[in-house]
Image (cartoon, rainbow, N blue to C red):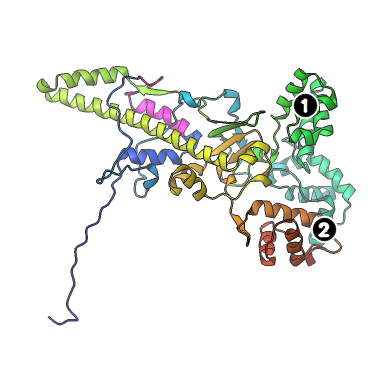
Amino acid sequence: MSQGSRQIQSQAQQQLQTLSPQQILVVRLLELPALELEDRVHAELLENPALEEGREQPDAEDSLDTNQVDEDGERLEPEDLSLGDYRTEDDIPDYKLQDGNYSSKEEQAEEIPFSDNVSFYEILQEQLGERDLTEHQRQLAEYLIGSLDDDGLLRKSLDSISDELAIYVGVETSEKELEEILHIIQDFDPAGIGARNLQECLLLQIKRKDNGPLKQIETDIVEKCYEEFTRKHWEKIVQRLNLPEDEFREAISELTKLNPRPGSSLGEAMGKNLQQIIPDFIVETNDDGSITLNLNNRNVPELRLSRSFTEMLEEHTKNKANQSKESKNAMMFLKQKVDAAQGFIDAVKQRQNTLMTTMQAIIDLQRPFFLEGDESLLKPMILKDVAERTGLDISTVSRVSNSKYVQTNYGIYSLKFFFSDGYTTEDGEELSVREIRKILKECIDNEDKACPLTDDELAGILKEKGYPIARRTVAKYRQQLNIPVARLRK
């Protein structure tokens, strides 16, 4: 045999991890949002007679061990698993369990309708069509609607919008005329749309309320004590407005129910049919600076093993020696159903623990935001940061954050909202990209429109403000904000 035709054979030993149905169930549970889990729990109750509504019995037996181990005795966490080829109709279904430790008030679990099939622009356009406007006024209104941010606020100055209309659309208008059109848009639903800042947003919502003493107190607090209100300096407000304690507390309670992001109730994109956002978590920021976290377990029952099924299984097991073929088959059926029910209960509890651990880590890392509700306070945070804090795998954190929402004092947010890259300076200081973009936008909004700032000049201003980034980085962030170069902003 020639050397060229010689074939080399080798043996290699490889250890492959096989996923059990229980492990697959745990992984799939992590990926489902609250609403889908809620739908499936009722289906499982119908499908498995060994599963019942109610608190789990403390002496229930045949509990499955969810702490699976591999051949070397290593514990297999859900983060080690990959669904890969396991997405078939035969997979074990998964749902939501209401655990007593994570109960929440029903009124907290708001359902926020949003459309992912009709765009934000189209919803406001429909309301615009109901107004009697001239063609010129309608054109101005459409441009203003298109200038709104995703949260429904207008952060561009009317002066800059007037310049944009002249440059890009060829329409001449004045700041006064634009303000008149903006007031029309601010009359659209939901209340607060078209506000130019948070203060105006709150006042627009208060304005829609029925007249009464409480309405006037709320207006005075936001109009005259806005800074104290945002800083929660309650005593200063009471003294300045000379308010009775009970009326003040009632007014503050009403104010905290207002929506600082009215556009979120109209949706953020296009795609699916009208649906409900059910928050998976409820985070409350208390007056004493503490933060309370709960899972949203609304409208789902607690689960337990069927007492009759477990008793029948015990009876069949006792008479195992003298069983007929039919009796053995019955015992196998009972054991299969009981094991599946207990495995499901254990998997849901494991899901709850993982969700709570992950959300608590996000709160700890982004605590300033949860206390104040100011986006600029969000720190750079990636999946790895949460994974290191929780001891979970990055893939697990990704599954938890995908399609999950949290209800806060300041609105409902997707968990993905809290993740953003950071910019590290030469001194090793990490800055939030979101914060840098916000400062950049403010610089451009306040520039002299007759002599717009170049990227080099913007880089210099940002450096003076404590954000030492390069000109090319300024250009990148400017493009992300859809802001044209200086010569096109004149």
Identify the residue position indicated by label 1 in the image: 235
Q: Which mark is residue 250?
A: none
Q: Residues within 10 Å of mark 2 (few under 14, many from 20)?
A: some
Please say whether residue 146 is one of the residues in the magenta stretch. Answer: no
Left or right of 469? Residue 382 is: left
- Name the foreground residue: 139 vs 165: 165
Q: Quadrant of residue 76?
A: top left
Q: Residues within 10 Å of mark 1 (few under 14, many from 20)?
A: few
The magenta stretch spans which residues?
Answer: 37-57
Q: Is residue 197 above or below residue 163?
A: above
In which quadrant is the N terminus drawn?
bottom left
Camera sees residue 140: yes
Which element is circle 1 on? helix
Q: Residue 364: image x %, image y %?
A: 56, 40
- Name the foreground residue: 428 vs 59: 428
CA separation in Å, label 2 and label 1: 38 Å
Identify the residue position indicated by label 2 in the image: 447
Q: Residue 169: image x %, image y %?
A: 80, 59
The residue at the point 89 percent across, 52 percent down is 174
Look at label 1 and name its amino acid: Glu
Look at label 2 and name its amino acid: Glu
Q: Is residue 389 above or below residue 421?
A: above
Q: Residue 362: image x %, image y %?
A: 55, 41
Which element is circle 2 on? loop
Q: Quadrant of residue 94?
A: top left
The residue at the point 80 percent across, 18 percent down is 244
Q: Residue 429: image x %, image y %?
A: 62, 56
The mark lying in front, picked from 2 and 1, is: 1
Camera sees residue 90: no
Q: Quadrant of residue 42?
A: top left
- Name the foreground residue: 215 vs 45: 215
